[in-house]
Image: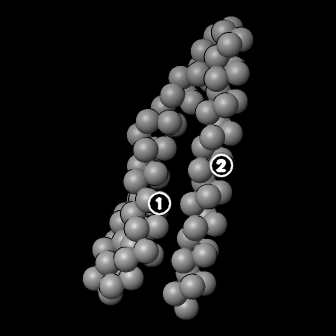
């Protein structure tokens, strides 16, 4: 999704579709942030929860919900862009 949305952003930029290019770039950057920063934190919280840290379980839940919300927003934005471009 990172590469695909970055390529789409470049293509849309070259086509003069600046708003759509911006949306695609936000999707690429947010996916990169989730993959590189948020998911490792979520995994660490889950491991700590399994090791007996009850607070880590709460942090895991918050992080997981955030990742799901970001993913849903990305999917919705992708659908909207595809519909408006077509």
Estimate how packed mark 1 is, as few (under 14), some (14 to 19) or many (20 or more) residues with alpha carbons within 10 Å.
many
Q: In this view, does 55 lie to the left or right of 45?
A: right
Quadrant, the C terminus: bottom right
Q: Position of residue 45 (x, y in %)?
A: 59, 22
Q: Position of residue 5 (x, y in %)?
A: 42, 67
Q: Where is residue 61 in the image (x, y as percent from the top left)?
A: 70, 30
Q: Is residue 73 visible?
A: yes
Q: What element carries label 1?
A: helix
Residue 69 tag number: 2
Which residue is pictured at 70% across the width and 21% down the height? 58
Which residue is pictured at 52% across the width and 37% down the height? 39
Please identify the quarter of the rendering in which residue 21 is found.
bottom left
Residue 50 tag number: none
Q: From what the image shows, is residue 12 above or below residue 26?
A: below
Q: From what the image shows, is residue 12 above or below residue 28?
A: below
Compare residues 71 and 51 and report the one nearer the observer.
71
Please identify the quarter of the rendering in which residue 24 is found.
bottom left
Instruction: Please identify the residue farthest to the left as the structure is shown.
Output: 14
Q: Is mark 2 on a helix, strand or loop?
A: helix
Q: From what the image shows, is residue 29 above or below residue 78?
A: above
Which residue is pictured at 58% across the width and 67% down the height? 77
**What count of labels does the image hold?**
2
Q: Is residue 39 left or right of residue 18?
A: right
Q: In this view, does 15 lie to the left or right of 53?
A: left
Q: Name the residue under label 1.
A: 27
Instruction: Please identify the residue farthest to the bottom as the structure is shown.
Output: 86
Q: In this view, does 84 lie to the left or right of 61?
A: left
Compare residues 25 and 44 and report the one nearer the observer.
25
Please identify the quarter of the rendering in which residue 12 is found.
bottom left
Estimate how packed mark 2 is, as few (under 14), some (14 to 19) or many (20 or more) residues with alpha carbons within 10 Å.
few
Q: From what the image shows, is residue 69 above or below residue 21?
A: above
């Amino acid at each position: 999704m990172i590469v695909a949305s970055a390529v789409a952003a470049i293509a849309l930029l070259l086509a003069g579709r600046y708003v759509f290019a911006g949306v695609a770039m936000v999707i690429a950057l947010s996916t990169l942030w989730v993959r590189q920063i948020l998911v490792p934190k979520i995994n660490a919280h889950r491991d700590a929860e399994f090791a007996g840290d009850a607070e880590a379980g709460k942090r895991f839940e918050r992080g997981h919900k955030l990742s799901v919300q970001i993913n849903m927003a990305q999917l919705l934005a992708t659908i909207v862009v595809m519909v408006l471009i077509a």
